Image (cartoon, rainbow, N blue to C red):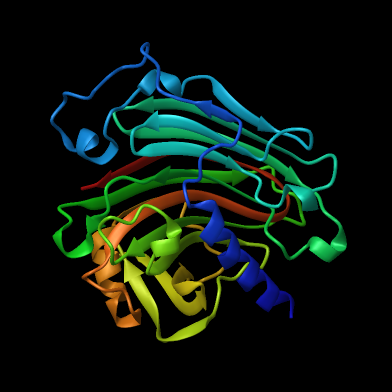
Amino acid sequence: MRSSILQVAASILSLVSVECLPAKNSVIAPGTSGTDLTHSKNGLMQTMGQVQESNCAGNTMSWSKNKTPWEKLQLASNLNLYQNVWQANKVLDSGMSDITCSSFNQGSLKWTTKFHMPCNPSDNNQVKTYTNVAWAGTPVPIKNAKIFNVTWEWKLTEESPDLVADVSFDIFLTKDPNCRKQECASREVMMWLGAIGGAKPAGQPASPGTVKIGGKYDFQVWQGKVNVPVVSIFPSDVTRRYTSFKADLKRALHKLTQYGVGEDEYIMSVGAGIEVFKGSGTLRTSNYIIDLY
């Protein structure tokens, strides 16, 4: 029963948290002091749009029980860093989440998330927070995408013994090129680089049940449905964490066509972050890069 609750909770969270929802109170938007790379004709600008690198350095979004659970730090037209304590009402009074954006230089993002998510035992199996960086630009057709490469170097430290979490990409697809919200999403693809404390994705094991990404990352494949069909992959060896991940995700999506992903679908949003059910820890990202256009 615990496993099934974990699966459903994780997928429900993903449908809400990577929606690139606007902050309700606090938004740090690009200012005139940032480094404007708008006129640079390179892949960075095709992916990000207008970039303001200096908005990152030193900015921290802090959450405690007396603060809004939603905040957004805008790094570029198409890229935002989110505070998202999705179920703040289920976190005890000592709960906290601090997100510090350390640097953003030529498309390489460095940030740290420190969290403490205590809860009542009855809420152990429900996701409390998903802090993430999310790309959401003009939807890109899978079959015509020139590039969809990602690099993510991360480390999870200061883990409490009871930590249950996953470090993951969350990709939403659509068949509508004008779609900008998850109400018109056609599919969700989750790519877990680490499953901590027994967390599992939504659904059941698929058949055939494995896929290799980037020539060296072995994943299990699961399929489920929460509002939209969900294809999830996570390390075949559940004790492994792919803490230095670099891959062509266009090829990865092509490999997942046998599980329902359509070449006629569009990439609507790409999130990268940590879902936390309970416990404490610090996620340190030393290098995150996305190229998508």
Front in this rendered view, residue 175 or 44: 175
The image shows residue 265 at horizontal and vertical percentages of 26, 67
Q: Residue at horizontal 27%, vertical 48%?
A: 138
Does residue 71 lie above or below 18 as drawn?
Answer: above
The image shows residue 58 at horizontal and vertical percentages of 53, 19
* Drawn side of residue 24 relative to residue 176, left or right: right
The image shows residue 267 at horizontal and vertical percentages of 30, 58
Image quarter where the N terminus lies is bottom right
Does residue 198 lie above or below 34 as drawn?
Answer: below
- Count of numbered tags: 0
Residue 288 picture quarter? top left
* Drawn side of residue 94 relative to residue 217, left or right: right
* Drawn side of residue 267 relative to residue 191, left or right: left
Q: Residue at horizontal 67%, vertical 78%?
A: 4
Does residue 176 lie above or below 129 as drawn?
Answer: below
Does residue 57 lie above or below 158 as drawn?
Answer: above
Residue 55 picture quarter? top left
The image shows residue 107 at horizontal and vertical percentages of 31, 33
Q: Is residue 286 visible?
A: no
Q: Residue furthest bottom?
A: 207
Q: Is residue 118 visible?
A: yes
Q: Residue at horizontal 84%, vertical 46%?
A: 92
